Amino acid sequence: MIEFHRVSKTYQEVRALDDVSFSVQPGTVTGFLGPNGAGKSTALRILAGLARPTSGSATVLGLPYAELGHPGYHVGTLLDASAHHPGRTGREVLTLGAMLLGLPRSRVAEVLELVGLTVKESRRAVGGYSLGMRQRLGIGHALLGRPRALILDEPANGLDPQGIQWMRGLLRDLTEAGCAVLLSSHLLYEVEQIADHIVMIGRGRVLAEGTVAELSRGRGLEQTFLDLTADADRSLA
């Protein structure tokens, strides 16, 4: 459903991604785990067609994002929860998205209910939203077209414990319906709770991938992650 094949990205003298390869299967959540600056956001921007790889390819449903017909029906993205115009209301943001996709206005009400934004909240300007509310709105916008693949960059940021529990349930419902979810985070515990598969990245390289049990190696996922990132730092020192 989602595939990175030997993707590298260089900005001037900085190699942000180095030969990254992994895939996301239908009906699963893949946690893309790494510290800040590891290359997660760069990889997702390439996948969403917002940046070009220096080499390699990143595809959704077998095609680069730019080559998908009506991509909003196939791929939902949340790369920046603060990207929407602060002067528009939440309802206006979703209504404009629905219009671009040719969806009926009734889909806006469905999505607002799905992400837990009330009618009153939807009529407030986005600039007055908390980060958690902007995250819910961004996830709702990504789900407008009922996509088969979902790309989320740090979606748990700003969510309270109730919101995080809601997000876990939402993602589980989506994967049970066959959706492929790629979720990046630097919050190891949250990824561990929801992910079927984990890809660990550091210094732009895939350090390891597998299930939580496979990567824990009897000593805990956090320790495995710390050891791998320390090894990556030493190798490039």
Image (tube, rainbow, N blue to C red):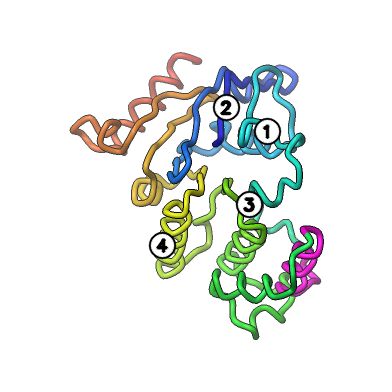
Judge the density around disc 2: few (<14), some (14-19), many (≥20) Cα neighbours within 10 Å: many
Q: Left or right of 21: which side holds 144? A: right
Three-letter amino acid code of the residue under disc 4 = Gly
Give the number of the disc on residue 46: 1
Residue 75 painted magenta: no
| Mark 3 crowdedness (10 Å alpha carbons): few <14, some 14-19, many ≥20 | many
Q: Earlier in the sequence, mark 4 or mark 1?
A: 1
Q: Which residue is mark 3?
A: 78
Which quarter of the picture shows residue 173?
bottom left
Question: Which residue is painted at 39% across and 25% down in the image?
Answer: 208
Q: Are marks 2 and 4 in contact (CB under 8 Å)?
A: no
Vertical comparison of 176 with 7: above or below? below
CA–CA distance between discs 2 and 4?
A: 27 Å
Q: Amino acid at mark 1?
A: Ile
Label 2 and label 3: CA atoms lie apart by 18 Å
Main SS class of the magenta portion in the image: helix
Quadrant location of residue 5?
Answer: top right
Disc 4 element: helix
Q: Residue under circle 2?
A: 4
- The boundaries of the magenta stretch are 85-101
